[in-house]
């Protein structure tokens, strides 16, 4: 349920009113203060809330029930875009950051070389998997804690914030110095993990599940936010469809749809959607044309020898060319 407060109502009056609502109905009140108006989002059991008596309050402009099951993630609760600061890099402010790096961290030389190259090409954040969710238990599982150490080395060397995936609750302490914790597609509905990440004061990159709907994705964001962490960045990374010509199908429509439904930033991962290097450029351009707030792209210094996802990884030179085009497209888009 949301209550829109009339313009020019003092903060004291709004606070007094919020406290009354909490006491009278036992609800949580989520406050959003905009330039023109203030929105109070009521959370919890709102069935007892007396709509007519609230509407009759002189400071209330309007009141309505929110049908969607996600509340904190809902744009109705927070009409303007959320901008999230990841180690000094902003996501959601129109700056369109590019996160780049290998699928997996493999060695110190590899991660540092790739980090330097992607930074020189314009990436502002470094990705690299340490704990890898692999389809086969016999495939490379990542360097695990050592991989995190190497990422931190690369961060020290280049100054770039780092993004890496977590798979289990008991690893949370290991991720203390990670700037952006990724929840991969396979763990999007690992609700216990989401709840624990919701207790942190750290940005979370939540990837859409392989066969998850938009509502399910937003409910997973809600799991994190309901525990108090509102720094959630969504990621469209392709969904599984009947089409085998590419690894997954990039759901371009999800970008404007999510923008409409939520205030959270949305980035796009063309690498896992495509599974093929040459598709990454057109998918990246399509994503930013559709309103994505950023991109996450896999780059490896020697894709042929990569221990995971080499088939979709760009070389640093290929990334350089694509990053340039993305920059040009961004400038062109800002003029329309
Ligand atoms: C990854 O980023 O390397 C990864 C495994 O991604 P996803 O969860 O989208 O498959
Ligand atoms: Mn990968």
Image: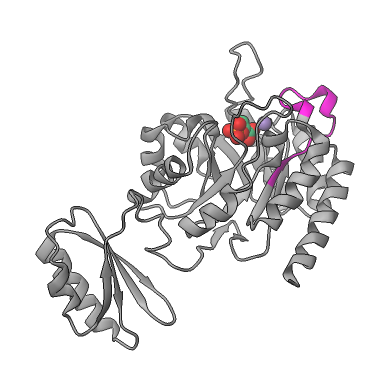
* Residue located at (63% from left, 57% from top): 293
- Left/right of residue 283 with respect to residue 137 in the rendered view: right
State the image coordinates of residue 60 (x, y, percent, origin top left): 24, 79
Q: 112 above or below 248?
A: below
Q: Which residues are magenta?
A: 296-311
Residue extending farthest top: 138
The answer to whether residue 199 is visible is no
Q: Residue at the spot x=58%, y=13% of the render?
A: 137
Nearest the viewer among 110 and 32 is 32
Q: Residue furthest front?
A: 242
Image quadrant of ligand 1 equals top right
x and y percent of residue 257 in the render?
A: 53, 53
Q: Is residue 69 magenta?
A: no
Vertical comparison of 123 with 210: above or below: below
Q: Quadrant of the N terminus?
A: bottom left
User: Relative to residue 244, is residue 306 drawn left or right?
Assistant: right
Rendering coords of residue 123 (x, y %): 75, 52
Q: Quadrant of residue 244?
A: top right
Question: In the visual, does 305 lie left or right of 227?
Answer: right
């Amino acid at each position: 349920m949301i209550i829109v407060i009339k313009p020019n109502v003092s903060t004291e009056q709004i606070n007094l009113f919020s406290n009354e609502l909490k006491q009278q109905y036992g609800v949580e009140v989520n406050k959003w203060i905009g330039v023109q108006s203030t929105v109070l989002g009521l959370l919890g059991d709102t069935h007892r809330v007396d709509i007519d008596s609230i509407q009759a309050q002189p400071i209330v402009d309007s009141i309505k029930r929110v049908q969607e099951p996600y509340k904190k993630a809902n744009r109705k609760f927070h009409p303007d875009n959320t901008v999230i600061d990841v180690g000094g890099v902003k996501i959601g402010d129109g700056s369109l950051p590019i996160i780049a790096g290998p699928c997996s961290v493999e060695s110190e030389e590899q991660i540092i070389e790739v980090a330097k190259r992607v930074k020189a090409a314009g990436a502002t954040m470094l990705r690299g998997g340490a704990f890898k969710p692999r389809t086969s238990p016999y495939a490379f599982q990542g360097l695990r804690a050592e991989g995190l150490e190497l990422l931190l080395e690369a961060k020290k060397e280049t100054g770039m914030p780092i993004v890496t995936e977590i798979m289990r609750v008991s690893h949370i302490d290991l991720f203390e110095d990670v700037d952006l914790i990724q929840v991969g597609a396979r763990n999007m509905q690992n609700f216990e993990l989401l709840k624990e990440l919701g207790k942190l004061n750290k940005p979370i990159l939540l990837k859409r599940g392989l066969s998850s709907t938009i509502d399910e994705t937003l409910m997973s964001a809600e799991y994190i936010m309901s525990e108090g962490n509102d720094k959630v960045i969504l990621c469209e990374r392709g969904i599984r469809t009947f089409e085998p010509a590419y690894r997954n199908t990039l759901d371009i429509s999800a970008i404007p749809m999510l923008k409409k439904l939520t205030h959270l930033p949305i980035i796009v991962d063309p690498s896992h959607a495509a599974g093929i290097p040459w598709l990454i450029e057109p998918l990246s351009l399509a994503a930013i044309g559709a309103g994505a707030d950023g991109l996450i792209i896999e780059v490896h210094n020697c894709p042929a020898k990569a221990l995971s996802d080499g088939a979709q990884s760009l070389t640093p030179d290929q990334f350089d060319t694509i990053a340039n085009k993305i920059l040009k497209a961004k400038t062109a888009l800002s003029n329309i």
